[in-house]
Structure formats: C-alpha cells, structure tokens
C-alpha cells in the first residue's frame, strides 16, 4: 500500500466523506493537502494559530497540522498509524515543514495512542474548552454562538435552554522533521520545565555549624585556603601532609581558633 495525494474529483469526494463521517463534520480552510492511504484519509492544513511555532519552540518556523484523520469502522489494525507515517512522506515531498502538530480530543475518547505508535511526541495539553450542552444532550461548541454576524450573550444562550460546560483541553502531539527542530523543541521544553529546588539535608543545621567552624582555616604548609569537610584537617593535599609529617609538628592556622 502506498499513499497518494488526492486531486480534483478524488479530493472533492474525500472532502465530502470528511464532512459526512468525521465527528467534526467540517474540513479545514486555506491551503491543505488530502492524502489517501488504503481506506484512510489524512488532511494536512496550515494551523489556524499563526504564532504556534513561537509557542512550540520559541522561534518562527514552518508548522503543518494534521487536521483530519478518518478511516471507516472495522478498518484493518494499525491502519491509522500507517496512514499517518505514509502521509508525512507525501507532505514532505511538497512542503518543507520544521514541525508537524496534531491534537487528540479526550472528550471524544481519543488518547493519542495512534500518534505515539507513529513516533510522535506528547507536547502537553491545551487549555480547558468552554462549550454548551443542549436539552437533548448534544454538545455545541462556543463558536457556534459567536461566529459571523451571530453573536449571543450568555443570558441569551441560557434562555435557549443551553447549559455551559467546561471540558478538558485537547492533547497536543508534535513530530520534528529535522535535527534542528528536534533541538528547538528540547530547548523549549527545558525552559518551560520548573527549576528543581535543592533539597536540604536532614542535618542541615549541624552542617552549617561545622562549615562555620572550618571557615578561615588554611593549610599549615602552603598557607592556601583549606576547603575540607573535616574540622580537624591540617593540610590541603597529600604532598603537604607528607611535608608536614617530615618537618615535625603541624601548626593549624585558623582565624576562628586564633580568636578563641
């Protein structure tokens, strides 16, 4: 099986299939590519958010979104994962993306397993989504009441029998298409990660007391500052210790002990 780019009448039939059978019942606008792989249909589109590259890796870049993915019920095992991998190759023949992005909607029972199987990387979760539930239980997107010339206030929407919902955000998955893009994603993830706080040892008070007692100590031979964990240290190295041993008694130089 090979993936093929759909054009002309084939593309229009695929768009009609997406409108009729995909759960969104819509197709992306703007520049896009329709790819067929066996019974599956993959649609690539330019993301609606023009600044998505800045949010992904903190710099401008070419990002394409896997906008629609559909296959008939009862399809062959792993068909969707194979279709995604094949469609990536078709897209890269016509475009030069830095990163690919797609979303899995947990509200529809999607967990992104097909993206993980296709070697995509989880990139967090989008913000919560506000929607409306009708009296018959149908969930309507918020933009349905705020698109075009139609814009209703919250009180007006509730008067129609709708109840506001707060739904979990979509799961985001990304796939870098170059080594530099993979590096950008890694660097951005490290910047977003919270800084790890150093844990104090359980004997922190005693350690500070001993550290204060050792402050100002110098080597009895070479007179350099003595950084040692032991309060009874006299020399800074093995060479100085041997030299002090051959020279007889060792005198400890310490500002703290002189003061005492």
Image (cartoon, rainbow, N blue to C red):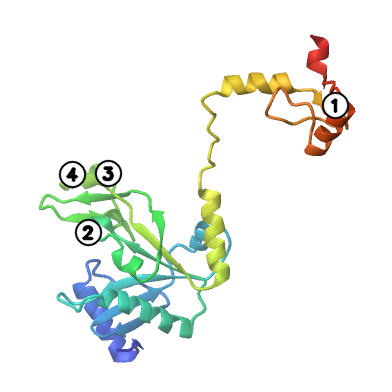
Quadrant of the image occupied by residue 200:
top right
Q: Position of residue 243 (x, y in %)?
A: 86, 34
Element type where label 1 sits in the image: loop
Q: Earlier in the sequence, mark 4 or mark 1?
A: 4
Does residue 66 show up? yes
Q: Earlier in the sequence, mark 2 or mark 3?
A: 2
Q: Earlier in the sequence, mark 2 or mark 4?
A: 2
What residue is disc 4 on?
159
What residue is disc 3 on?
154
Image label count = 4
What residue is disc 2 on?
109
Q: Earlier in the sequence, mark 3 or mark 1?
A: 3
Element type where label 4 sits in the image: helix
Is residue 35 toward the left or the right of residue 198 in the image? Answer: left
Determine whether 159 is above or below 53 in the image.
Answer: above
Residue occupying the point 89% across, 28% down: 247
Residue that extends furthest to the left in the rendered view of this protein: 136
Residue occupying the point 17% across, 48% down: 160
**Label 4, label 3: how far apart the Cα atoms are:** 9 Å
**Label 2, label 3: how far apart the Cα atoms are:** 28 Å
Is residue 205 toward the left or the right of residue 107 in the image? Answer: right
Determine whether label 3 and label 1 are within 8 Å by CB: no
């Amino acid at each position: 099986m090979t993936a093929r780019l759909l054009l002309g009448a084939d593309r229009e039939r695929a768009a009609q299939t997406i409108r009729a059978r995909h759960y969104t019942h819509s197709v992306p606008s703007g520049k896009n590519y329709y790819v067929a792989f066996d019974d599956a249909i993959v649609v690539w589109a330019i993301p609606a958010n023009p600044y998505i590259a800045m949010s992904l890796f903190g710099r401008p870049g070419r990002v394409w979104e896997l906008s629609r993915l559909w296959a008939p019920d009862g399809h062959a095992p792993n068909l969707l994962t194979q279709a995604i991998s094949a469609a990536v190759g078709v897209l890269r023949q016509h475009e030069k993306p830095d990163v690919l992005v797609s979303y899995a909607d947990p509200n529809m029972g999607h967990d992104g397993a097909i993206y993980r199987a296709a070697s995509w990387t989880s990139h967090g979760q989008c913000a919560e989504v506000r929607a409306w539930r009708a009296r018959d239980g149908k969930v309507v997107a918020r933009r349905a009441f705020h698109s075009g010339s139609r814009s209703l206030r919250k009180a007006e929407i509730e008067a129609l029998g709708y109840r506001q919902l707060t739904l979990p955000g979509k799961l985001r998955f990304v796939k870098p298409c170059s080594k530099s893009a993979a590096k950008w994603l890694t660097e951005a993830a490290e910047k977003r990660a919270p800084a790890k706080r150093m844990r104090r040892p359980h004997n922190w008070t005693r350690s500070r007391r001993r550290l204060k007692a050792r402050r100002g100590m110098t080597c009895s031979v070479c007179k350099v500052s003595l950084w040692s964990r032991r309060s009874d240290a006299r020399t800074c190295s093995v060479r100085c210790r041997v030299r002090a041993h051959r020279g007889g008694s060792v005198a400890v130089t310490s500002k703290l002990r002189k003061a005492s």
